[in-house]
């Protein structure tokens, strides 16, 4: 019997130089923090666009954020949904202020613009 709700894929954004900044960021975390991040990734794969607070929320435009509390520190991962039940993780950072800093949003938006060009190329 087929699963009526197939899981979403979570993919790391890769820049033009082959770097995956969010993947690198995750690997730099402690084992305990990585486990917490992986748990949130699992929720995103299971619930997709239905995942809401306290784990995910819309930021602006196409950008959403994963909200990760490790006990020691809070983190945010900015991401976008794409065709084909995929999420692309664009940018990650430690949360230090109540409002998402414009600088962090600008980085994610640059990654998104590059990703959109690449995805349009795949469609052809």
Image (cartoon, rainbow, N blue to C red):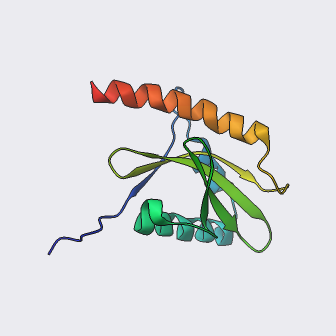
Task: Give the answer, above or below, for where 106 lies relative to 38.
Answer: above
Residue 18: where, in percent of width, then height?
51, 32
| Quadrant housing residue 110 | top right
| Quadrant housing residue 20 | top right
Count of numbered labels shown in the rendering: 0
Going 65% across and 69% down the picture, which residue do you hit? 31
Query: Which quadrant of the figure contains the N terminus?
Result: bottom left
Asked whether, in this view, residue 81 is left or right of residue 15, the answer is left
Going 46% across and 65% down the picture, which residue do you hit? 50
| Quadrant housing residue 21 | top right
Tell me if residue 15 can be seen: no
Going 63% across and 53% down the picture, which residue do you hit? 77
Tell me if residue 2 can be seen: yes
Asked whether, in this view, residue 120 is left or right of residue 111, the answer is left
Residue 73: where, in percent of width, then height?
79, 66
- The foreground one among 72 and 43 is 43
Asked whether, in this view, residue 99 is left or right of residue 26, the answer is right
- The foreground one among 111 and 57 is 57
Going 46% across and 30% down the picture, which residue do you hit? 116
Query: Which quadrant of the figure contains the C terminus?
Result: top left
Residue 57: where, in percent of width, then height?
61, 59
Task: Give the answer, above or below, for where 2 lies relative to 26.
Answer: below
Q: Which residue is outermost to the left?
A: 1
Residue 103: where, in percent of width, then height?
77, 37
């Amino acid at each position: 019997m087929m699963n009526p709700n197939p899981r979403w894929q979570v993919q790391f954004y890769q820049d033009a130089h082959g770097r995956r900044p969010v993947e690198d960021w995750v690997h730099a975390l402690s084992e305990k923090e990585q486990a917490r991040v992986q748990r949130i990734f699992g929720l995103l794969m299971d619930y997709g666009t239905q995942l809401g607070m306290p784990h995910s929320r819309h930021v602006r435009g196409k950008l959403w954020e994963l909200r990760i509390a490790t006990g020691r520190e809070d983190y945010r991962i900015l991401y976008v949904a794409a065709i084909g039940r995929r999420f692309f993780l664009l940018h990650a950072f430690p949360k230090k202020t109540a409002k998402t800093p414009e600088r962090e949003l600008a980085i994610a938006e640059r990654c998104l613009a590059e990703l959109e060009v690449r995805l349009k190329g795949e469609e052809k």
